[in-house]
Image: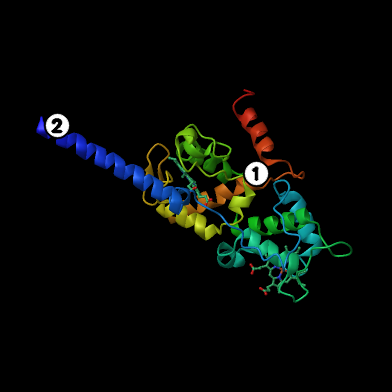
């Protein structure tokens, strides 16, 4: 009897303690720090007109803008790769928009030689896609990666990369939505690589390094993890001329792929 009482007291104490610490946690922001925050690194003095693209950037429009405005100095060559992996898309956008005060890159504004915000995004993302080797629509690589992603990632991130896979309702923080440019453009490819390789602590995002997918005979080594980074990136741009809303565009192709199911 005495023992029971003691047990109950202990339980009460433990309960009280855990409430206390839950309280402390929310006061210190510990609970909210579980959400994987992203913060813009853009210097609004250099680029006052900065905004994220209104629709997913188009690689086709980007190619045309690039050829007209950038290719006199740049070839989108793989030799830039190491450097580009270390810079966020939005930091490069700031550069294209306002330059370093050198007058070379200050494409923001109106008139001759100036570009709209969306044109700057299109040309930049086209540049990045070619330098970093993002997958081309209709390529064998892309369909291989569709299968890899579908088999290993879609359960959380959804086939369309929108963070809406079957498990998403039970996870906190929720799986990342890769079509959210506000989030993905604050990440370098290197950061995505590390998150994939080592996982993200205190979240459901697993560490992929040295895992196997025996069905598809895949080993998740560094090469495969870089492929996944490139694959994840393709959710935030389109390869058609129109800058369609990624969600809508991907939904259409998804519907087609599953035979017209609503
Ligand atoms: C007159 C030549 C010239 C033109 C035109 C030009 N660039 Fe550049 N760009 C350069 C030079 C030179 C550098 C390297 C300078 C530096 O890093 O300071 C560079 C660097 C860059 C970088 C790398 C920034 C970084 O540090 O990550 C990006 C991205 C870029 N340019 C995008 C563009 C885009 C997009 C266009 C067209 C809309 C464009 N550039 C037009 C000369 C040019
Ligand atoms: C069990 C669920 C789960 C699976 C399976 C999973 N992820 Fe994640 N992933 C998450 C969660 C949850 C987050 C968000 C974590 C956060 O907000 O900090 C995340 C975050 C990420 C991020 C970081 C995004 C960012 O904004 O920095 C990348 C990249 C990523 N996942 C790619 C993948 C890929 C590729 C696969 C398959 C090889 C995969 N994930 C499989 C749950 C999962």
Tell me residue 166's x, y (percent). Answer: 49, 31
Numbered disc total: 2
Tell me residue 211's x, y (percent). Answer: 37, 47
From the viewer's perspective, tell me whether residue 23 is left or right of residue 10: right
* Residue 76 shows in this picture: no
Residue tagged 1: 137
Residue drawn at 51 percent across, 60 percent down = 190
Residue tagged 2: 4
Question: Which quarter of the rendering shows the N terminus?
Answer: top left
Residue drawn at 64 percent across, 50 percent down = 181
Residue drawn at 44 percent across, 56 percent down = 222
Q: Within the image, what quadrant is residue 98 found in?
A: bottom right
Which of label 1 and label 2 is nearer to you? Answer: 2
Question: Which quarter of the rendering shows the C terminus?
Answer: top right
Tell me residue 202's x, y (percent). Answer: 40, 48
Query: Can you say whether 16 is above or below 262 in the image?
Result: below
């Amino acid at each position: 009897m005495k023992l029971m009482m003691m047990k109950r007291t202990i339980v009460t104490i433990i309960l009280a303690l855990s409430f206390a610490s839950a309280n402390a946690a929310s006061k210190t922001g510990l609970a909210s720090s579980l959400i994987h925050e992203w913060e813009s690194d853009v210097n609004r003095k250099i680029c006052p007109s900065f905004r994220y693209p209104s629709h997913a950037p188009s690689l086709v429009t980007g190619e045309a803008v690039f050829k007209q405005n950038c290719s006199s100095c740049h070839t989108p060559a793989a030799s830039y790769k190491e450097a580009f992996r270390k810079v966020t898309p939005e930091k490069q956008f700031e550069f294209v928009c306002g330059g370093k005060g050198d007058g070379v890159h200050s494409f923001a504004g109106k008139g001759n030689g100036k570009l709209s915000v969306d044109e700057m995004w299109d040309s930049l993302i086209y540049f990045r896609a070619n330098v970093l080797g993002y997958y081309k629509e209709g390529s064998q690589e892309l369909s291989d990666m569709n299968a890899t992603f579908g088999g290993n990632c879609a359960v959380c991130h959804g086939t369309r990369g929108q963070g809406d896979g079957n498990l998403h309702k039970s996870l906190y923080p929720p799986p990342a939505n890769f079509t959210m440019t506000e989030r993905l453009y604050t990440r370098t490819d290197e950061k995505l690589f590390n998150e994939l390789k080592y996982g993200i602590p205190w979240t459901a995002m697993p560490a992929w390094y040295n895992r196997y997918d025996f069905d598809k005979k895949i080993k998740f080594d560094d090469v495969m993890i870089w492929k996944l980074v490139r694959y994840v990136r393709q959710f935030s741009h389109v390869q058609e001329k129109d800058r369609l809303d990624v969600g809508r565009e991907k939904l259409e192709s998804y519907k087609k792929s599953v035979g017209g199911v609503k």
